[in-house]
Amino acid sequence: MEESNFRDGHGGLIETSRILALKPALVGKKRPRGRFEDRRFMIVANPQVCYPEGMVGDATKATPELGKKINDFIFEEMVHLIKQNFEV
């Protein structure tokens, strides 16, 4: 797979790592790699042409440790945004 077509999205490294950290039984043993085919626009009539494998990214590199780091970061950022925007 050409690296210029390789991005992360649905079912890729980040998403799979997050699920491995939270509920590993939901992640299958076979972890594919999927490429993104750029069609120049964010919204297209038939998005499946952009995701030929049905997912985008490299799920083979996903780990529960990475997922925990990502989940912790998201949690901390959400707490920060809530405190910043609401009286807490």
Image (tube, rainbow, N blue to C red):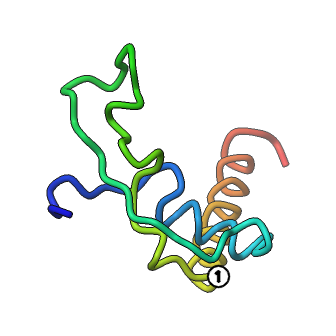
12 relative to 10, above or below: below
For image coordinates 35% across by 18% down, the residue present is 44
Residue 76 location (% of width, % of height): 67, 65
For image coordinates 48% across by 69% down, the residue present is 59
**Residue 75, located in which quarter of the rendered image?**
bottom right
- The tally of labels here is 1
Query: Which residue is disc 1 drawn over?
Result: 64
32 relative to 63, above or below: above
Q: Report the side of 46 relative to 1 (left or right).
A: right
Circle 1: residue type: Pro
For image coordinates 73% across by 50% down, the residue present is 83
Q: Which residue is nearer to you in this view: 76 or 32?
A: 32
28 relative to 5, above or below: below
Q: Is the N terminus in the top left, top right, bottom left or bottom right quadrant?
A: bottom left
Q: Which residue is nearer to you in this view: 17 or 35?
A: 35
74 relative to 24, above or below: above
Q: Which residue is nearer to you in this view: 80 or 39?
A: 39
Residue at the extreme top of the image, as rendered: 45
Residue 64 location (% of width, % of height): 64, 82
Residue 58 location (% of width, % of height): 40, 67
For image coordinates 38% across by 41% down, the residue present is 51
Say which element carries label 1: helix
Residue 70 location (% of width, % of height): 58, 70
